[in-house]
Image: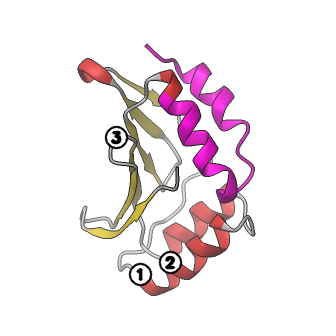
Amino acid sequence: MFTIEQIKEAHAKVKSGADFPNYIQDLIILGVKGYDTFVHDGHVEYYGVNNYNVTADEKYAEIKVADFPNKELFIELLVKHQHGETDYLTFCNDAAQCGIAKWRVDILEMTCTYFDKSEHELLIEKIPS
């Protein structure tokens, strides 16, 4: 099974949203089936086969997530991030400002779903392979 250290090594190669597809490929090789990233503190819960999971600790000081989502603004900021115009922490702050509480990457389905505080799906993206 995979470890947090192996995941950190793969994530260290990510400098912007443009690097995300290669990161996903690295996770597939490790056996990660998916993960949830929590915007308020950056902790991530990774899961694999047979209910295996590991949790990475928070990555930054707590960010307040807006109570009401702004999907249109989020899409604009997401596109900028995916084009390499913002770093990860900026993207997390942008997501929080837009009411994104977490995102779930499903590696089997190759999707990334963004949720608000009430666990409502705001946006589902297909991950480029």
Q: Is residue 76 above or below residue 122?
A: below
Q: Which residue is mark 3?
A: 108
SS assignment at label 1: helix
Q: Which residue is mark 1?
A: 71
SS assignment at label 3: loop
From the viewer's perspective, is 9 left or right of 40? right
Q: Is residue 92 above or below residue 43?
A: below
Mark before the other along the chain sequence, 3 or 2: 2
How many C-alpha atoms fall within 10 Å of the one at disc 3: few (<14), some, or many (≥20)? few
Q: Amino acid at mark 1?
A: Lys
Q: Give residue 74's mark.
A: 2
Q: Amino acid at mark 3?
A: Leu
Magenta part of the chain: 1-28
Mark before the other along the chain sequence, 1 or 3: 1
> Which residue is situated farthest in the front direction here?
129
The secondary structure that dominates the magenta segment is helix
How far apart marks 3 and 2 lie (CA) works out to 25 Å
Between circles 1 and 3, the one closer to the viewer is 3
Tell me the quarter of the picture where residue 106 sits. Answer: top left
Q: Amino acid at mark 2?
A: Phe
Q: Nearer the viewer, residue 71 or 58?
A: 71
Q: Give residue 98's mark.
A: none
- Residue 63 locus on image (x, y percent): 54, 60
SS assignment at label 2: helix
Marks 2 & 1, CB-CB < 8 Å contact: yes
Tell me the quarter of the picture where residue 89 sits. Answer: bottom right
How far apart marks 1 and 3 lie (CA) works out to 25 Å
Q: Residue at x 47, y 55 (%)?
A: 127
